[in-house]
Amino acid sequence: MASSPTVLDSDFRYIDKKGNLMKTRTELTIAQMLTFLEQNYEYNYELSINGKIVMVDFKTENGLIEVIDSDDDIKKYKEIKEHSPDTKIMAIGHPKFAAQISELDDIVFYDKKSPQTGSIFIEDPSFAFDYAHILPLVEKCSILHGHTSSVMVELVGQMKNDMVIDFGDAKKIIKEVITVLDHKFFINRKYLKDEDDSHFRIGFEGPKGMFDLKVPKNTTYLLEGEATVENLSTELIKILAPKLPPNVEAIGVYIYEGFNKGAHIIAKLDKQ
């Protein structure tokens, strides 16, 4: 029996909202968090040490951030600490490597007695859905076509009993929400021309000509906006938010539209 192919991190392309092509999902997550916190940053910052240029992953107004994923990253980090002691730098990365940096004790501070904000991310083969859509404003996508998309969800919030939410509970909620979107035809509500008890009539003039479709209501999902993968991420957040416990303060949703492309939307929840 043939084994399933392994999907490596290098198989994906991670692009932040500034258009920077990042090396790993960890880097993209840091970029998204900085954006969410309204912290400006520079990616691949050139730091000069004794006339030598060292590339640091992130430069912010408050200091540098280096993602530790290899022995070379550890060497770079220690070089910055030794030869540029006034530079404020934080290391983030895989425990296999980050645990080798004893200086982390001097950089990362937190008060265990105070409420802590944490985040979890959940990916699962069952977090996938099939759908059809039309994008009349995009010539290539202005005909009826379909996708199979996979989903990853991030949850940020105040930790209770040392966790944001039980993984099993979160997985069950996310699967229920994805079921709502599965095997649906997505279309912007503004293209709705008429309806009866069981059908919508969708019509628009697009790059490929005039479309006039009669589609069943029970398999059609009307959106407030175009049926882009970004808007589907937003829609998933809208459905997901009311089902989560009150300690969850923000939701991030990645939806991959096939391979090597997709969208990531992060939204802060209004608890009022």
Image: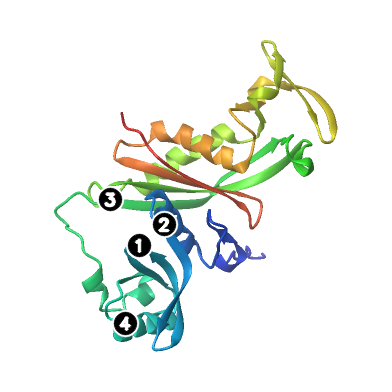
Q: Residue pushed farthest right?
A: 209
**Residue picked out by circle 3:** 117
In the image, 179 versus 38, the foreground residue is 38
When the figure is inspected, residue 133 is found, relative to residue 252, above or below; the finding is above
- Residue 93 visible in the snapshot: no
**Residue picked out by circle 4:** 84
Kindly state the secondary structure of the residue where label 2 is placed.
loop
Q: Earlier in the sequence, mark 4 or mark 3?
A: 4
Q: Earlier in the sequence, mark 4 or mark 1?
A: 1
In the image, 48 versus 82, the foreground residue is 48
Kindly state the secondary structure of the residue where label 1 is placed.
loop
Q: Is residue 186 left or right of residue 121?
A: right
For the residue carrying disc 2, how many other residues have a C-alpha within 10 Å: few (<14), some (14-19), or many (20+)?
few
**Gap between marks 3 and 2 measured at Cα:** 21 Å
Q: Earlier in the sequence, mark 2 or mark 1?
A: 2
User: Would you identify the image quadrant in which residue 146 lies?
Assistant: top right
When the figure is inspected, residue 124 is found, relative to residue 20, above or below; the finding is above
**Residue picked out by circle 1:** 61
User: Which is more foreground, mark 3 or mark 2?
Assistant: 2
Q: Earlier in the sequence, mark 1 or mark 3?
A: 1
The x, y position of residue 52, in whole percent, is 45, 87
Q: Looking at the image, do the residues carrying marks 2 and 4 touch, with CB atoms under 8 Å apart? A: no
Q: Earlier in the sequence, mark 2 or mark 4?
A: 2
The x, y position of residue 122, in whole percent, is 45, 51
For the residue carrying disc 4, how many other residues have a C-alpha within 10 Å: few (<14), some (14-19), or many (20+)?
some
Amino acid carrying label 2: it is: Asn
Amino acid carrying label 1: it is: Glu
Q: Looking at the image, do the residues carrying marks 2 and 1 touch, with CB atoms under 8 Å apart? A: yes
- Residue 81 visible in the snapshot: yes
Q: Residue at x 56, y 60 (%)?
A: 14
Q: Residue at x 65, y 56 (%)?
A: 259
When the figure is inspected, residue 192 is found, relative to residue 132, above or below; the finding is above
